[in-house]
Amino acid sequence: MTERTVPQVGERAPTFRATASTGEIALDDYRGKQSVVLYFYPKADTPGCTKESCAFRDHSAEFAKRGVAIIGVSADDLSAQRAFDEKYNLRFPLIADTDRKVITAYGAWGERTRPDGSKVQGVLRWTFLIDKSGTIRKVYQNVTPEEHASEILQDIDALDLG
């Protein structure tokens, strides 16, 4: 078993090109233009992932005012990502990372605990805050879905990324 590598604060964010609910997307598309909240979630349209994604949606105007883009990533296929986006009117890209290339590049695959207490291998609920130059400014590995968007907004202000 290979050891997971997680990009750290101060390092260059792993670049990617992927298919999202909104079409083709690349991290380099944002370089020099916008900071990025790149959040990983276990499965589209499940309770915790819905709460987290809807909180990003509900705060999307505040992220936009600060010039920060939101991108979600899970291993769901494109039809599941599009359905999730449409059902909750999320309005930001959701990457369909079925081959787990982006997930692996960010170390966001591993053992996690389900709400019922069972352990499974899957996408970890992690987020990376990436500045305009493509540098990771904050890594979130203990995420509370309902409060996460507000926490990131505070950090964007504290780090003067807006």
Image (tube, grey):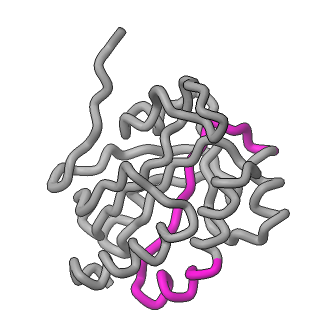
Quadrant occupied by the N terminus: top left
Is 32 drawn above or below residue 139 in the view shown?
Answer: below
Residue at the limit of the structure toward the left, as seen here: 10
Residue 156, image quadrant = bottom left
Asked whether residue 27 is drawn in magenta, I would say: no
Answer left or right for 160 relative to 121: left
Is 2 drawn above or below residue 53 in the view shown?
Answer: above
Which residue is depicted at the point 28% across and 30% down?
5
Q: Which residues are magenta?
A: 58-79
Which residue is depicted at the point 40% across and 79% down?
153
Answer left or right for 12 relative to 162: left
Answer left or right for 114 relative to 83: left
Q: Nearer the viewer, residue 35 or 117?
A: 117
Q: Position of residue 142 (x, y in %)?
A: 39, 52
Answer left or right for 148 relative to 73: left
Which residue is depicted at the point 27% across and 79% down?
161
Q: Position of residue 125 (x, y in %)?
A: 49, 47
Which residue is depicted at the point 63% across and 31% down?
98
Residue at the limit of the structure toward the top, as seen here: 1
Residue 30, image quadrant = bottom left
